[in-house]
């Protein structure tokens, strides 16, 4: 009788573990595939993998990326690469303190009006993704964050961002 119970427990634990593993793979959120830049009334879709390859100089401009890059001069292109590769905050503990502070939350609220993940404008996904990246690496670049965000499309309203910073 005792042997039957232990076999039943082993089989039950095995089945439960298999179910949990299957569910966790089904529920995993994919990272962003496309960055949609809204600038001066235009909306330009840019595949994030191509943007990352271009920034890392693994591959030159593709058709979608070239449309966007033709709008800016060579010096500005270098600035975009620098922006994508630069760490958002250099000190991990300071980044966490800033994110959890009132002013950090206020900044995320303001930015979330102009940065949308699919249909989400709350900024919560950006916050949690940034915190998760900080747990796994010492510095997080803009490109790291963009690649890790859990959405199929990230929309950035540059006109709105510019108006926010020029107030």
Image: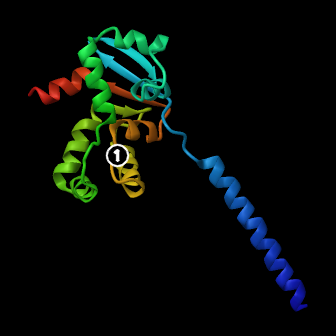
Residue positioned 54% across, 40% down in the render: 30
Quadrant of res 87? top left
Position of residue 52 in the picture relative to residue 70 (left or right): right
Seen from the viewer's position, the closer of residues 8 and 33 is 33
Residue positioned 89% across, 87% down in the render: 3
Q: Residue 57 appears at what percent x and percent y?
A: 43, 25
Seen from the viewer's position, the closer of residues 108 and 122 is 108
| Residue closest to the far bottom | 2
Quadrant of res 165? top left
Does residue 127 lie above or below 149 as drawn? below
What's the image's color scheme?
rainbow
Position of residue 142 in the picture relative to residue 2 (left or right): left
Disc 1 crowd, CA 10 A, few/some/many (<14, 14-19, 20+): many
Does residue 153 lie above or below 11 as drawn? above
Does residue 15 lie above or below 69 as drawn? below
| Residue closest to the far front | 57
Quadrant of res 77? top left
**Quadrant housing the C terminus:** top left
Residue positioned 19% across, 46% down in the render: 106
Does residue 93 lie above or below 49 as drawn? below
**Callout count:** 1
Residue positioned 39% across, 15% down in the render: 44
Q: Residue 21 appears at what percent x and percent y?
A: 68, 58
Position of residue 116 in the picture relative to residue 94 (left or right): right
Describe the element under mark 1 as helix, strand or loop.
Answer: loop
**Quadrant housing the N terminus:** bottom right
Seen from the viewer's position, the closer of residues 62 and 24 is 62
Task: Return the residue at label 1.
Answer: 140
Position of residue 145 in the picture relative to residue 152 (left or right): left
Q: Residue 94 appears at what percent x and percent y?
A: 22, 56
């Amino acid at each position: 009788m005792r042997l039957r119970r232990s076999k039943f427990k082993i089989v039950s634990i095995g089945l439960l573990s298999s179910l949990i593993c299957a569910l966790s793979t089904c529920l995993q959120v994919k990272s962003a595939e496309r960055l949609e830049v809204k600038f001066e009334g235009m909306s330009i879709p840019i595949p994030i993998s191509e943007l990352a390859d271009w920034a890392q100089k693994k591959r030159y401009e593709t058709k979608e990326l070239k449309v966007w890059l033709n709008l800016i001069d060579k010096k500005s292109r270098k600035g975009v690469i620098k922006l994508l590769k630069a760490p958002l905050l250099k000190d991990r503990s300071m980044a966490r303190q800033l994110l959890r502070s009132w002013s950090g939350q206020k900044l995320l609220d303001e930015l979330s009006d102009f940065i949308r993940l699919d249909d989400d404008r709350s900024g919560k996904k950006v916050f949690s993704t940034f915190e998760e990246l900080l747990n796994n690496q010492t510095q997080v670049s803009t490109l790291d964050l963009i690649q890790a965000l859990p959405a199929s499309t990230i929309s950035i309203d540059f006109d709105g961002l510019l108006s926010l910073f020029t107030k």
